[in-house]
Image: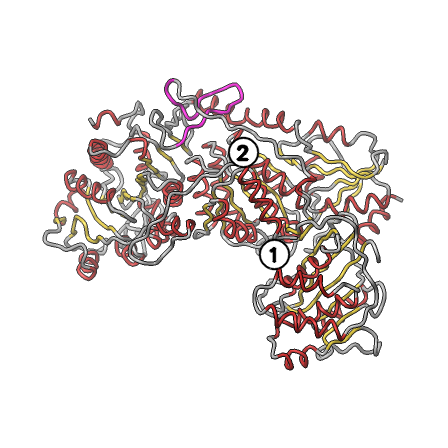
């Protein structure tokens, strides 16, 4: 499939040079590729929050759920739970996912919900014109902090790692090939996957040069190794100067939330490393009426 | 006493009063009684005074009386607090080891529970079984009935429970013989169970909730019924997640409801507005309790009418219903889910602690079969547009995965395809499309009994009530010869039916569990004025005796 076929008539309103273009190009290429490999387009749902990142769903001609600020994750989890055969890809900003909606991210990682989070982390609020976010460095001068922030940033990958995320990677908007590679891995990962994308906001926090000087691609790193994953994740704390690793830090396969939930519903739940459950059998309105009457007998 | 009597069963939180009350109700149910249970308990797990009033009557009842025929006391406090409510002294049964009945002396039926439990080597919780045994004997109920109900309701250590109950039974003496009514026994369900059943009836697929009194028992009931009815029931991290997950399920074509109380609903209002904008149907069950803020978590109120009417930013269509008893809760929950899907709007079921946690004899046959309302589905012709503008404002729905359709929903203002726009003309068009649905919804509601009328239809004095006050108002009005008007649908306000109900009324008396007369305020919008207000806002529902007295004061 040609990525062009995934375009819509919506006018693109990102600033020239915005890091979001790289994400859009990469995700369209990856989705086209996955469709060629047999994923059907109607089984893909894109979810976005609110902020510059979120416009991406207007620009991709696929099923989409344009949510509200901070609330991509619960909607995505429910879409997956409603139909586990659907691929759910969530786009969210750093203010969106790491600020307003952090609670949901923590729980989705803890549950190992089988969804993919692509975080457009530009470390500034763009659409509200330039305030600090949870990942802005200490001393960041924004419109709400004219004298500089007085709080340290969080390292989102470290937070997610400690919450039980089963796939964690980092990319930048100067590196489409790597983005394509990790987007595909993240989407194909069975379980909760999150890619922190150092997406540059050219208007309010232009970090292209800063990142270009510090990034390197992980080589010879075993993402299944818990300790070395943590070590690499902690190498850069989003604040002080340090080498910035790109690529997949961590990958682990365990049963997903949906698998366990549906197995519980079907009476086949186990806490072993693999979970299976039979197909659910639909029932008619007449069955329902009969069952309601049966149930009420217990209340006499 | 014969045709209508009440039993107050009291102790401290953690004593199992609730279960004991239900077992007594089920024993009386075997005599063909119609049951209503009022539960009064504090927001603590252990300690604090707790009681249930079980009212049993030949006729359907859904209110409690202040005066009771029996008191069953597990502790001193129960007797001290409630003795004055006894219609006839001495009709109390108590733990002789704990309760000092002075100064009356020898009156009442004392059972030495500590001694009996020790002799039978039974745990403390079986004090209830012993007193139920003593009560059954006192009330002239056959042992076989008690045994049958125990066997059906108690799974753990049934033999020991029966043995302990037998000790109580043999220590008491018969004071009165309650006669059986020649009518079928009905299931006893609480309002929340009825709401759950109604949602199931209308094809519920998913239910999400974060625990909050008095809505939690909907969650517990549906979680328990999940396998039988193939329901996805989940308790996520917060009410914010609950409501957003509901929108995700709705997008996928799954009929979904959420449950909460006022505080949780505060957190859901962003999703409510999103539901209105994106036209994703969701049913919100809101169980009111005493506020503001944490308020009295386990006590009742009718204070969220204007909150649910106005919740959520922006202007959008919604449906609000306030059922008055378990049967209405069942029926209107089903209708809410159906109409939410037909019009793709959020629907709110407004309950309160009295209805949600009160238990009622439930006659499935007493309500009409909930009418099937078809949702508008895409016919697979032409290019799919999620927000196609139509005469009624209702756009045909398609659900993922649909091969020929791209389904885009949006919280931003959007065009017919769901793509974000800021164009003034499309903005106006879409705003009108969404609001137009309410007009057709209101027309549809004309096919329903959206306003109920009871009592003496010729009376010039009418009681105006809503929600759980229905039962107490109808009973009081019937004894005083008044009319009762109960709007069950509160929005879109059923103006035509309400006007008709007001025919011939000269004095309108509103009865509400709030301090500001919220229904009176709502009808004022349409030019109607209430003449008298009877308001109660101490967390407790009106008892029948209390309301009768207050009504007598205003109709003079």
The residue mark sitting in front, 2 or 1, is 2
Q: Quadrant of the C terminus of chain B?
A: top right
Residue at (29% x, 25% y) in the render: A8
Q: Chain of mark 1?
A: B
Residue that sits furthest to the front in the current view: B144
Residue B378's place in the image compared with B123, above or below, is above
Magenta segment, prevailing SS (helix, strand or loop): loop
Q: Position of residue A260 (x, y in %)?
A: 36, 52
The answer to whether any part of residue B456 appears in the image is: yes
User: Are circles 2 and 1 on residues that touch, CB within 8 Å?
Assistant: no
Q: Which residue in the structure is indicated by mark 2?
A: B340
Q: How many marks?
A: 2
Q: Nearer the viewer, residue B442 or B56?
A: B56
Q: Earlier in the sequence, mark 2 or mark 1?
A: 1
State which region is magenta.
B382-399
Q: Is residue A32 magenta?
A: no
Residue B295: image tag: 1
Q: Nearer the viewer, residue A203 or B541?
A: B541
Real-space Cα separation, disc 2 to disc 1, in angstroms: 31 Å
- Tag 2's secondary structure? helix
- Tag 1's secondary structure? loop
Residue at (70% x, 72% y) in the render: B166
């Amino acid at each position: 499939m040609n990525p062009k076929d995934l375009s819509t008539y919506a006018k693109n309103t990102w600033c020239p040079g915005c890091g979001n273009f790289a994400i859009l190009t990469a995700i369209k290429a990856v989705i086209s590729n996955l469709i060629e490999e047999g994923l059907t387009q109607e089984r893909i749902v894109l979810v976005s929050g609110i902020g510059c990142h979120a416009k991406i769903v207007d620009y991709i001609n696929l099923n989409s759920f344009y949510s509200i600020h901070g609330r991509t994750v619960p909607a995505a989890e429910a879409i997956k739970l409603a139909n586990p055969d659907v691929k759910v890809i969530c786009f969210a900003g750093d203010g969106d996912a790491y600020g307003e909606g952090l609670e949901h991210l923590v729980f989705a990682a803890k549950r190992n919900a089988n969804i993919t989070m692509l975080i457009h982390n530009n470390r500034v609020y763009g659409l509200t014109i330039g305030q600090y976010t949870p990942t802005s460095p200490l001393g960041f001068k924004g419109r709400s902090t004219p004298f500089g922030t007085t709080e340290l940033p969080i390292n989102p990958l470290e937070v997610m790692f400690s919450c039980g995320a089963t796939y964690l990677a980092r990319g930048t908007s100067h590196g489409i090939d790597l983005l394509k590679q990790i987007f595909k891995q993240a989407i194909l990962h069975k379980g909760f996957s999150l890619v922190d994308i150092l997406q540059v906001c050219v208007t309010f926090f232009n970090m292209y040069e800063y990142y270009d000087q510090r990034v390197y691609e992980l080589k010879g790193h075993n993402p299944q190794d818990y300790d070395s994953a943590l070590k690499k994740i902690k190498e850069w704390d989003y604040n002080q100067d340090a080498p910035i690793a790109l690529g997949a830090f961590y990958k682990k396969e365990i049963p997903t939330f949906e698998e366990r939930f549906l197995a519980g519903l079907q009476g086949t739940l186990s806490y072993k490393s693999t979970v299976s459950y039979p197909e659910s059998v639909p029932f008619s309105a007449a069955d329902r009426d009969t069952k309601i009457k049966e149930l009420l007998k217990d209340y006499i | 006493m014969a045709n209508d009597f009440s039993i107050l069963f009291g102790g401290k939180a953690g004593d199992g009063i609730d279960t004991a009350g239900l077992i007594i109700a089920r024993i009386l149910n075997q005599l063909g009684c119609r049951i209503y249970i009022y539960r009064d308990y504090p927001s603590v797990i252990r300690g604090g005074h707790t009681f249930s009033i079980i009212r049993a009557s030949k006729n359907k009842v859904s209110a409690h009386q202040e005066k009771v025929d029996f008191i069953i006391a597990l502790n001193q406090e129960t007797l001290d607090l409630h003795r004055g409510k006894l219609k006839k002294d001495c009709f109390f049964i108590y733990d002789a080891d704990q309760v000092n009945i002075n100064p009356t002396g020898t009156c009442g039926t004392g059972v030495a529970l500590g001694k009996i439990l020790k002799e039978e080597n039974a745990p403390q919780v079986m004090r209830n079984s012993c007193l139920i045994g003593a009560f059954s004997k006192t009330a002239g109920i056959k042992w076989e009935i008690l045994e049958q109900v125990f066997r059906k309701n108690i799974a753990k250590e049934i033999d020991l429970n029966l043995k302990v109950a037998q000790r109580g039974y043999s220590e008491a003496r018969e004071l009165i013989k309650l006669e059986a009514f020649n009518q079928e026994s009905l299931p006893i369900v609480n309002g929340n169970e009825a709401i759950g059943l109604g949602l199931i009836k209308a094809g519920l697929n998913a239910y999400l909730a974060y625990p909050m009194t008095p809505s939690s028992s909907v969650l517990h009931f549906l979680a328990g019924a999940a396998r039988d009815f193939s329901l996805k029931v989940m308790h996520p991290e917060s009410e914010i997640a609950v409501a957003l997950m509901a929108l995700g399920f709705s997008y996928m074509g799954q009929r979904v409801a959420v449950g909460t109380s006022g505080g949780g609903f505060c957190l859901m209002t962003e999703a409510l507005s999103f539901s209105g904008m994106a036209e994703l149907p969701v049913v919100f069950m809101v169980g009111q309790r005493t506020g503001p803020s944490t308020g009295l978590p386990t006590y009742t109120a009718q204070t969220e009418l204007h909150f649910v009417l106005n919740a959520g930013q922006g202007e959008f269509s919604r449906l609000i219903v306030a059922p008055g008893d378990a049967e209405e809760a069942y029926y209107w929950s089903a209708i809410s889910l159906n109409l939410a899907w037909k019009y793709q709007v959020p629907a709110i079921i407004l309950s309160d602690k009295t209805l949600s946690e009160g238990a009622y004899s439930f006659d499935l046959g007493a309500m009409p079969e909930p009418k099937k309302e078809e949702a508008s589905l895409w016919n697979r012709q032409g290019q799919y547009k999620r927000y196609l503008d139509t005469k009624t404002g209702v756009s045909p729905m398609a659900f993922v995965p649909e091969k020929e359709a791209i389904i885009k929903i949006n919280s931003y203002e959007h065009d017919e395809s769901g793509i974000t726009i800021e164009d003034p003309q499309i903005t106006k068009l879409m705003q009108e499309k969404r609001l137009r649905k309410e007009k057709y919804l209101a027309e549809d509601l004309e096919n329903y009994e959206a306003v109920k009328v009871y009592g003496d239809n010729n009376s010039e004095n009418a009681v105006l009530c809503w929600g759980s006050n229905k039962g107490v108002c109808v009973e009081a009005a019937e004894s005083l010869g008044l009319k009762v008007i109960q709007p069950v649908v509160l929005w879109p306000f059923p103006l035509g039916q309400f006007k008709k109900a007001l025919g011939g009324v000269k004095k309108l008396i509103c009865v509400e569990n709030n301090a500001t007369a919220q229904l009176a305020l709502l009808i004022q919008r349409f030019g109607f004025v209430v003449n008298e207000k009877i308001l109660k806002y101490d967390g407790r529902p009106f008892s029948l005796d209390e309301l009768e007295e207050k009504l007598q004061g205003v109709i003079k």
